[in-house]
Image (spheres, rainbow, N blue to C red):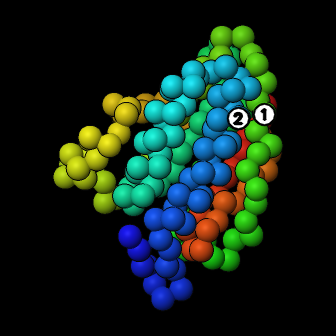
Amino acid sequence: MSYTRTASATYTTTDIENVVRRVKVDLCMIADSTGGWTAQQAANYLNDIEELAKAGYLAWVDVTLLSNGIEVKAIRFDVDIDAGTLTPSRPGGVLWPKVTSPRLRIVIGYTDTYDNVAREKMATKLKINWTTNHEDIGHGGLSSSGGRNYVSSTYGMQRKDWAA
C-alpha cells in the first residue's frame, strides 16, 4: 500500500512499519524498566499503535509514568507525514526508573478521518477497548528533556521527552 500527500511526501506501509518499530523499542524499554505494563499489555498497545498508524488514523501517542498518582516522566510521539527534512535518530535512551506504585498511562490521538465508519472498520484489528481520556496530559509539572526523530522516507514520528 502506498500513500501520497504531495509530490514531496510519499511513503509506504513499510515506511510506517519501520518508524513504528522504533517506537516499539522505546515503549518496550519503558514497560520493562518501570514494570508498569506486563509484556502482554505492552504487546496489545503496540499492536494498536501499528494498526492505527498503517490505516492513517494515528495522530500521536502519549505515555506517562506516574508514581502514586504523580507524574515522573512522559514521552510523546507525534506523527509527521511530511518528515523528509527531519534528521533521523536511533531509538533508545528511555530507561525509566522503577518507582513505587508505578502506573503507565497511554493516551492516543486520532486523525480527523477516524470517524464511526473507521472505528467499525478497525474494531477487529485492535486489542484495546480505547475510551475517551479526561486526564491532563499537558505534563505541566515536568520539564522538557529532549527528544528524537524516527523517519523512513517522508513518514515519521517526532518524540518529545519530559522529566521531573
Callouts 2 and 1 close, C-beta under 8 Å:
yes
Identified at 70% across, 35% down, the residue is 29
Q: Is residue 2 left or right of residue 105?
A: left
What residue is shown at x 38% (from left), y 70% (from top)?
1
- Residue at x-position 46% and y-position 84%: 6
Q: Is residue 49 above or below residue 150?
A: above
Q: Name the element at disc 2.
A: helix
**Residue position marked by numbered label 2 in the rendering:** 29
Q: Give percent across and percent down for residue 11.
A: 50, 74
Q: Quadrant of residue 57?
A: bottom left
Amino acid type, callout 1: Leu
Quadrant where the C terminus sits is top right
How crowded is the residue under tag 2: few (<14 C-alpha within 10 Å), some, or many (20+)? some
The kind of residue tagged 2 is Met
- x and y, in percent, of residue 122 in the image: 28, 47
Seen in the image, is 94 located left or right of residue 15? right
Separation (CA) of disc 2 from disc 1: 6 Å
Q: Position of residue 145 (x, y in %)?
A: 80, 45
The answer to whether one can see residue 78 in this image is no
* Disc nearer the start of the sequence (2/1): 2
Residue drawn at (71%, 23%), measured in percent from left and top? Answer: 34
Above or below — where is 31 with respect to 114?
above
Query: Label 1, on which residue?
Result: 95
